[in-house]
Structures are given as structure tokens and as C-alpha cells.
Amino acid sequence: MSIFSEKEQELISNAVESAERYTSGEIRICVEKTCSEPVLDRAANYFKKLGMDKTAQRNGVLIYIATEDHQFAIIGDAGINKLVPHDFWDSTKDTMLAYFKEGDLTAGIIAGIKMAGDQLKTYFPYLDGDVNELPNEISFMDGK
């Protein structure tokens, strides 16, 4: 998918790596062109498909984006959801949306990654021996 240049993909992957450096949590980015169902349902389906519900502490966060449909969602697993402030995901989406409206998809995603990483660091600090449970690269999906 050519929505991101190689440099932008590297910036996003590096942002995930940086955000995860101080937490046992996991962050993934999932991108596809169109969303064939309600956006939160789609994000939840990919959350499971990408194995994000299998992290040891249930502290995975997924940022899902359908580029052509201009839809996105950010969702967390049970472990993080019960700890973050009740409006955290909405405020994160608002921050990201401000960048998206300016036409800067990459900066919006990176802002969301940073915000999620800050919360994960607070509630799920890095533990000695922690391993990166999930890849940091963008998951480009084909809509299936």
C-alpha cells in the first residue's frame, strides 16, 4: 500500500519501538484502504486477527485506519482499558484527528502512539526480561 513512503513507515515503526521501550505494553498500527463494517467492529476484528488479545498482561493497543474511507479507531485490551481515564481513547482520537485534518497522517499516528505509550508506561512499566511480543511494523491489510 503506497499511502506511506518508506521514510514514513520507518518513522511510525520507530515511534512504536520508542513508545514500547518503557513499557511491557504492545502497540500496533493496522491500515487498509476501506472499512467494510462499523469501524470499531473492524478494529476489534483485526485486534484479534493480529493476536493482540494474547499479550501476557492484556495491554495491547491497536490504532486502525481505513485511508480511503477516512475512518479510524484506537482500542485497547482489557488490561489497559480498566486503568486509563474514561475519556482517554476519545482524547487520543481528537489529537490524532487534528493532524489528519491538516493532511498529516503520519504525524497523527505518531501522536497517537506517543499518547498510548505514555499511558502504557504509567500503568505497565517495563519489566526486566520483557520481550517485544508483537511486531512494530505497520500491518497493511487487504480488507479480507
Image (tube, grey):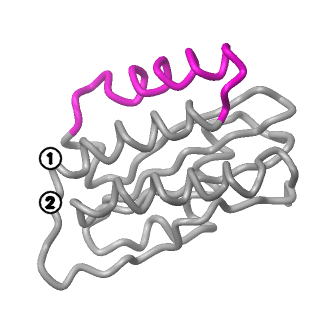
Q: Which sits in the foreground, 103 or 35?
A: 103
User: Main SS of the magenta segment?
Assistant: helix
The residue drawn where x is 36% and y is 72% is: 55
Q: In the image, which disc is placed on residue 125?
A: 2
Q: In the image, which disc is placed on residue 18?
A: none
- SS at badge 2: loop
Instruction: Tell whether position 90 is magenta.
Output: yes
Residue 122, horizontal then vertical, whole percent: 14, 46
Instruction: Tell whether position 91 is magenta.
Output: yes
Q: Which sits in the foreground, 21 or 93?
A: 21
Q: Report the residue that reaches farthest toward the bottom.
A: 129
Q: Is 140 on the left-hand or right-hand side of 142?
A: left
Q: Which sits in the foreground, 93 or 81?
A: 93
Q: Report the residue that reaches farthest toward the front.
A: 7
Query: For the residue carrying disc 1, how many other residues have a C-alpha within 10 Å: few (<14), some (14-19), or many (20+)?
Result: some
The residue drawn where x is 79% and y is 36% is: 67
Q: Is residue 82 above or below residue 18?
A: above
Residue 53, horizontal then vertical, whole percent: 44, 65
Q: Is 119 on the left-hand or right-hand side of 43?
A: left
- Mark 2–mark 1 Cα distance, whole angstroms, equals 6 Å
Q: Is 53 on the left-hand or right-hand side of 79?
A: right
Three-letter amino acid code at disc 1? Thr
Q: Is residue 2 above or below residue 135?
A: above
Three-letter amino acid code at disc 2? Pro
The residue drawn where x is 20% and y is 51% is: 121
Identify the residue under disc 1: 122
- SS at badge 1: helix
Tell me whether the residue at label 2 lies in contact with that at label 1, contact meaning CB atoms closer than 8 angstroms. yes
Residue 24, horizontal then vertical, whole percent: 25, 66
Residue 90, horizontal then vertical, whole percent: 43, 22
Residue stretch rendered in magenta on the structure? 84-105
Residue 144, quarter of picture: bottom right
